[in-house]
Amino acid sequence: MLLKHKDKPRGPYEVIVVGSGLAGMTAANKLAQNGRKVLLLESHNKLGGFATWFRRNQGEHIFDISLHGFPVGMIKTCRKYWSKEIADSIRQVHRVRYINPQFEVETDFTRTHFTSVLVEKFQIPRATVDAFFYELETMNFYDAPKMTNGELFEKYFPRRNDVQRFLLEPIVYANGSTLEDPAISYGIVFSNFMSKGVYIFNGGTDRLIGLMKDELVKNGVDIKLHSKIEKIEIQEGVVKGVWLDQEFIQAPVVLSNANLLSTIQNMTGPEYFSEAFIKKVKAVRLNTSSCQVFMGLKAGAVLPDIGELIFTSDDPEFNTDLILSPKIGSQTFSVYYPEMRPDKEPRYAVVSSSNSRYEDWKKLSEEDYLAQKKRVIERALVGLEKIVPGIREMIDVIDCSTPLTVERYTHHQKGSSFGTKFEGLEVSMNLHKELPGLFHAGSVGIIMSGWLGAANYGVIQSHAVETYLDLLTKNQLTQEGQIHV
């Protein structure tokens, strides 16, 4: 049931999911399919988390927030845990382009084509390429990190900055990986894409989330928007529910889809965890943030077929530190053609995405902040003009988001677009072992980020929730049997 603003959730529930990103929604749907009584709370005015959208000019323009593109595994995940209609709306992207001073490449982003490019264009021996891909395929996120991304590339492609750029740059935009991060954070995500390329959801994020909302309601999930909880209630060392609008809602399980650190430090409180666990929590590093420039074309304006994902840069060499700098020369263009939303008035849109550091934006005065936003917009226009001359005259509306925008709408600490670094995964997965009844599913450990990673992590954690609820039922039956005897 989609609860209205004045409606009060009618507990008790078995599970309260806090936050409706793809991990939270998928977990809620899976648990409801299993017959559990679930409440889904979202602080924003719509579901989706980062998988969201906004409108401009009375709805004439619809912009997707996320950098679109995910592995083929999303089809299986959606078919199994959502619906056939959602899965059938996922289609492959055929034109992914690189444009930078070191090389220009167009690819369908499959292993077969990447292998041919590495061998023929970059002159890498075929045996080396095969060995590289084999090492990626054998990585497992349960394994301890053995090397960094930088060490991985130096092992197979020593002193080949151009090859690093070709292989790593897309994943930097996908989950914030750097050369200093564990190679596992890159390898698993990259090999997932390499299986059959990049895919997107046809119809736009608004249609996707609408279909997901319908599935949640059909399966009996209670949904309440505009609902930022005040506190997770802990009694005698276990979860008892949450406080919302100064009212207590009872549930033995709370699954947080919020920022990991906010879940532990703010929603719960460090006093409920052991010193050893809090030490691990303090060691968790937040990942970086991002900027987007949203450009909607005028009615009747036609954009030539320039591809759907374009990784561009003016920087002479690849440098992950420079990618995060305010002096960044790199940005990725996501191109939305009218067939993306066939039921709407034909419109073209282009979204520029670039990684950035929260600290570089937070310290700015209001005047400097607005000036920096203008520079980001101008950088996007200049970069797009190199691909489509005269694009400025075709644009009807333009807007820009920054790390502070991300912080405002998601409540993620430091506006993190990609959750936490690798060490966050262990903390997230073991949260319920430290505090019974408290679970977390979200963008953590870099691996569990992006659309597919988030959805699958929601499934993984829903299984852990089921195990815990079954244990509670078994203990209750045992106690009742003892009392009866």
Image: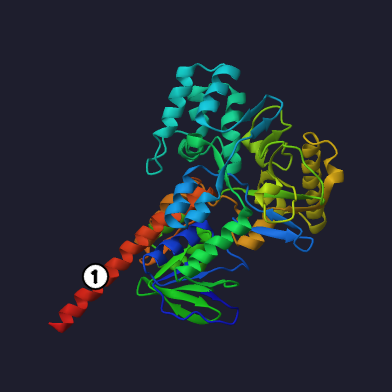
Q: Residue furthest right?
A: 393
Pointer 1 residue: 474
28 relative to 366 in the view: left or right = left
Picture coordinates of residue 340, whole percent (x, y): 66, 49
Residue 17, placed above or below residue 451: below
In which quadrant of the rendered image does the C terminus lie?
Answer: bottom left
156 relative to 374 in the view: left or right = left
Q: Residue furthest front?
A: 343
Residue 469, placed above or below residue 376: below
Report the number of discs: 1
Q: Residue 284: tell me if it is visible.
A: no
The kind of residue on which mark 1 rests is Lys
Picture coordinates of residue 221, whole percent (x, y): 47, 70
In depth, the one of 304 and 77 nearer the eye is: 304
In depth, the one of 188 and 89 nearer the eye is: 89
Picture coordinates of residue 307, whole percent (x, y): 68, 36
Residue 21, placed above or below residue 181: below
- Name which residue lies at 53% across and 66% down: 214
In depth, the one of 266 and 176 nearer the eye is: 176
- Name which residue lies at 45% across and 71% down: 220
230 relative to 314 in the view: left or right = left
* Residue 480, quarter of the rendered image: bottom left
Picture coordinates of residue 465, whole percent (x, y): 36, 63
